[in-house]
Amino acid sequence: MANEALRILDERTNADYSVPVNQGVIRAMDLRQIKTGPEDFGLMTYDPAFMNTASCKSAITFIDGDKGILRYRGYPIDQLAEKCTFLEVAYLILYGELPTEQQLKSWMNEITHHTMLHETTKRFLEGFRYDAHPMGMFISTVAALSTVYPEARDVHDPEKRKLQIHRLIGKVPTIAAYTYRHSLGFPYVYPDNDLSYTENFMNMLWRMAEPKYHPNPALARALDILFILHADHEQNCSANVMRAVGSSQADPYVSVAAAAAALSGPLHGGANEEVLKMLDEIGSKNRVPAYIEQVKAGHGKLMGFGHRIYKNYDPRARIIKWAADQVFAATGKNPKLEIALELERIALEDEYFIHRKLYPNVDFYSGIIYQALGFKPDMFTVLFAIPRTVGWLAQWQEMIEDPEQKIARPRQIYTGYAERNFVAIEKRVEQKLAAAR
Ligand code: CMC
């Protein structure tokens, strides 16, 4: 609606202001004119954790958390998961439209030709301890690619940007697979360009002495669907980090590494690993009610439950349940599923979870599938990071091209001391330190 405005009466001064409203949003900078006098800095907003602040305009992903809707570039997630391959969806997320047959062919060809790692990067990976967490190896190795491709620093050159985007999408499965092989002490497997993106990933993970790896098509499809579901999720914690680090014009390798670091936390992508630890701790179906009581009493959280935006069922969780059935048909059921289903059943009937609108999120079932596929829990977040690299890069590209964006630099409300005079060391008395307060 055109010409909407918000009228603000400042009771401190009795001054009246009119602030434009566009798409239900006011610009925080429009509040700066609201002052108590010429010395006043002007009104700011305070919003820890960005609970009610839009930090950008974006045309990539749409979420309606109350209705449980997720769309990439306008297409509902369930349609994309059913009908597309991951690389097709990656193209859509990055370029805004589904590729034609010809575009898809050359896109697949382009990505496939960037799957190899420089031998020095391979040796870099070899330097990690045998028990290094795969997510730590993944983050560091992605950052290390920055040293291999110094031209990536030229972030304002669209062609150079495109090349790094292709390299990153091509190389993240290779890095992920190498972290897996490293933790098992197995030799690294080079990419096989005859295979699809997901099949090649499986080849690099699981090929042993056979001359050609033949992936199970049902498992390859299930993994591809999981990749589609994880590809982007608008302004989540790691996308926000990608944009913030990228806003300083850092290169995309270190920016993706920073975003992956944000993803690794247990409240974000690290939750899938935590879900498995939780199911292990519960141990059996009959211990679920006691565990839920413990959570309600304030001891820990139900990992894989709750979401900042979804206050209805996470649409990805529904599709993941379907993918789980496909995987279990091939691998046999993961015994943890029984505990997870019981946890979900009881939680969804419990007033504590209903009142707080806590539903299973994408991480609740993904771990159970990954485990059935043969992964240890510490690999789960790496499996999330592979497809999410596409989302991070699309968010980064959009940020770079947006003329309204500048270096990200929030304001603060200073709560420390006013000015005080320096005290010589011999006159200092021990004070309670800020970090220990
Ligand atoms: N188990 C029990 N209680 C919970 C949970 C949970 N998983 N999540 C939120 N609550 C409670 C919370 O204690 C609070 O209760 P009260 O009002 O009594 O203080 C209320 O629900 C609102 O929670 P909040 O912490 O204000 O919500 P938030 O939007 O800040 O946090 C979240 C969202 C995802 C971090 C949180 O729900 C959580 O920690 N969930 C478990 C971790 C998890 O599964 N993370 C994956 C998120 S989805 C995929 C991804 O982003 O990677």
Image: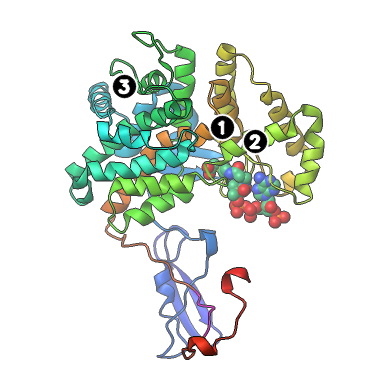
Q: Which residues are magenta?
A: 413-417
Position of residue 367 in the picture relative to residue 228 (left or right): right
Rendered residue at 47%/91% (across/down): 421
Q: Indicate whether 69 appears above or below 105.
A: below
Q: Is residue 107 left or right of residue 315?
A: left
Q: CA distance from mark 2 to mark 1?
A: 8 Å
The residue where tag 3 is placed is: 190
Q: Which residue is mark 1?
A: 377
Q: Which mark is residue 277?
A: 2
Colour scheme of the rendered structure:
rainbow
Q: Label 2 amino acid?
A: Lys
Give the prevailing secondary structure in the magenta stretch.
loop
Q: Residue at x 51, y 59 (%)?
A: 50
Figure check: 425 above or below 77: below
Under circle 2, the secondary element is helix
Mark closer to the chain start, 1 or 3: 3
